[in-house]
Amino acid sequence: LKCHQCTTTAPTRRPREGTMLNAEEFLCPELRLAMCHVKEAMRTILHSLVVCRSIGGHRPIEPQVVLSELLDVAYLKTDEADFDDALEQAVAQFSEMLESGPSHAGRAQLVLSFYVTKSRKHSIWNILVGADEKVVFEQWRMPVVLQHFRRHASPTDNLREEANLQASASQQVHQALHWVIGRTNAKVEHLPPPPQTHSAYKFDVSFAIDGKELGAAAALRSSLSQTIRHIPHIV
């Protein structure tokens, strides 16, 4: 597993989702954001990544240029309706998790994993987990640390605090977009053949706090564990 980092901070334990043999992993610059900016920041980066990995051959993509209503940045948005819905759901869940999470957290990672599928061999186990296996070939990890809003007695000072947090978020996201786009353009030799059914590769979005995986993948494993416990033994 190859890891490209922009900082000297060691990566946390990686949540595993599917096979990750020879996958490229990218640790994005850490974003220190106020709660009100988390959703928009993640939205701009995720959409940009999906557009950068939209090299499918079934039709040319027509990405939309979006001017953020909250941050001073512009980004490209995929024209695939299914992908758009999936990304919007992911950023909403990530923002909600940070806002309602344990007080000791204050930081989390959003993980975007691009994958292809291959057929599994027929077995009882594969009936439970599905006929296709996800093979992750690229993973992007986006660490976020919450910046708490400092309340002041003066309304003017509060407005200044809000403006400073917004300016900081815009600058960080702008730098992150440059970093992400630069890496996607520089690292292409590991990409599998372009998808034929969609413009972009398939992807999953998961979350991690303190190295512990959250989201759909963790829920699936828990559900499978419960199912396996109730499978009758064949004598």
Image (cartoon, rainbow, N blue to C red):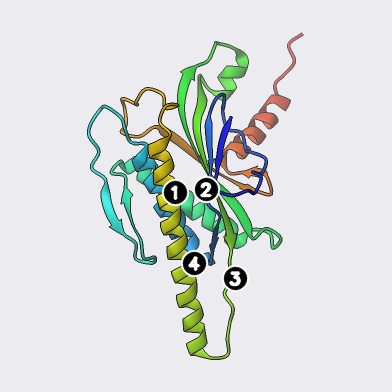
Q: Vertical placement of 179 versus 168: above or below?
A: above
Residue 121 falls in which quadrant of the image? top right
N-term-proximal mark, 4 vs 2: 2
Residue sitting at x 68%, y 44%: 212
- The disc, 3 or 4, on the residue closer to the chain's N-terminal end is 4
Res 36 label: 4
- Residue 21: x and y in percent read 57, 24
Q: Nearer the viewer, residue 110 or 96?
A: 110
Mark 1 or 2: in front is 1
Amino acid type at image mark 4: Cys
The number of numbered badges drawn on the structure is 4
Q: How far apart are marks 1 and 2 (CA)?
A: 8 Å
Residue occupied by mark 3? 148
Kindly indicate whether the residue at mark 2 contacts the one at mark 4 (C-beta within 8 angstroms).
no
Report the mark closest to the observer, 3 or 1: 1
Q: How far apart are marks 3 and 4 (CA)?
A: 10 Å
Q: What element carries label 1?
A: helix
Residue at the top extreme?
A: 235
Res 85 seen here: no
Task: Label 2, secondary structure: give it.
Answer: loop
Q: Name the residue under label 2.
A: 28
Dot 2 or dot 3: first in sequence order is 2
Q: How far apart are marks 2 and 3 (CA)?
A: 22 Å
Disc 1 designates what residue? 179
